[in-house]
Amino acid sequence: MKRAGCGRTAVMVLGIVILGLGISLFKLSALGNDPSSAMVMAIGERIHIAFAPTLLAANCLWFAAEWKWGRHYIGLGTLVNWFGVGYISTFFTGILNRLVDAPQGMDQKLAVMAAGLLVLSLAASMYQTADLGIAPYDSLALMLRDHFPVKYFWCRICTDCICVIVCLAFGGLAGFGTLVCSLGLGPFIHFFNIHVSEKLISCLDGRAVSGSAEQ
């Protein structure tokens, strides 16, 4: 079972690495990032601090709430997301800026955004299906659902709307990409759950259990 856990851990870590790439693609599209990333980017640019350390600080605040009201959502995935996503995204942003030119026309921007949507959906599917802990920001909507008689969808809309408002207040970019991230990820995540993540974890868990039994 420890090796089976290693399989899930590998899927979770890979999902978070891919998540960093997805954030970078949305940033490259210049059509707006997911609400939480857009807010953090806006705050960081206003106070002249890079995205990664700003996200790290924001995660500290969100984690304090998760520790108090949603401790059962905390796991290894919480920590990897907390400390890793910002720096992974910064790494991929540097690579993309060196390899490709910024998209010029709307058709190019939409193409980059579409690629980001698929990458972000795959990443979210892998990280969530691994079920090894919820990221500090993602836990906010779950905790609202747990403590108030409101469906998760509306709780998530609430937290995302607050992020968009703060983003705009700090002069950040919240555009079509932000709207797509808020409302359009669900069906794609569901698709990747069925066709990629669940099968991958089942395969890795099965191999790990088989190897453990042989020993």
Image: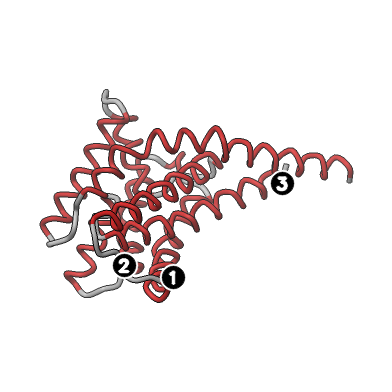
Q: Nearer the viewer, mark 3 or mark 2?
A: 2
Q: Which residue ends up furthest to the top in the rendered image?
A: 149
Q: Dot 2: what SS?
A: helix
Q: Which residue is drawn at 66% across and 45% down?
A: 5
Coordinates of residue 2 in the picture (x, y in percent) = 71, 46
Which one is nearer the viewer's eye here, 149 or 33?
A: 33
Identified by mark 2, the residue type is: Phe
Q: Which amino acid does label 3 sit on?
A: Lys
Q: How far apart are marks 2 and 1 (CA)?
A: 11 Å
**Quadrant of residue 189 within the rendered picture:** top left
Q: Distance between the residues labelled 1 and 3?
A: 31 Å
Of callouts 1 and 3, which one flags the residue occurring earlier in the amino acid sequence? Answer: 3
Foreground residue, 200 or 71?
A: 200
Q: How far apart are marks 3 and 2 (CA)?
A: 35 Å
Labels 3 & 2 near each other (Cβ < 8 A): no
Q: Which amino acid does label 1 sit on?
A: Phe
With 9 as the anchor, is 15 left or right in this view? Answer: left
User: Which residue is found at the position 43% from the left and 67% from the top?
Assistant: 92
Provide the secondary structure element on which disc 3 rests. helix
Picture coordinates of residue 133 (x, y %)?
Answer: 49, 45
Asked if residue 195 is positioned above or below residue 3 in the image, the reply reads above
* Closest to the observer, 127 or 144: 127
Left or right: 51, with 187 as reference point: left
| Tag 1 and tag 3, C-beta contact below 8 Å | no
According to the picture, the residue beneath numbered tag 3 turns out to be 2
Look at 28% across and 43% down and name the residue there: 180
Q: Give the residue number, with chain letter if any, for mark 2.
A: 51
Can you identify the residue that label 1 sits on? Answer: 91
**Sequence-wise, which precedes: disc 3 or disc 2?**
3
The mark nearer the N terminus, 2 or 1, is: 2
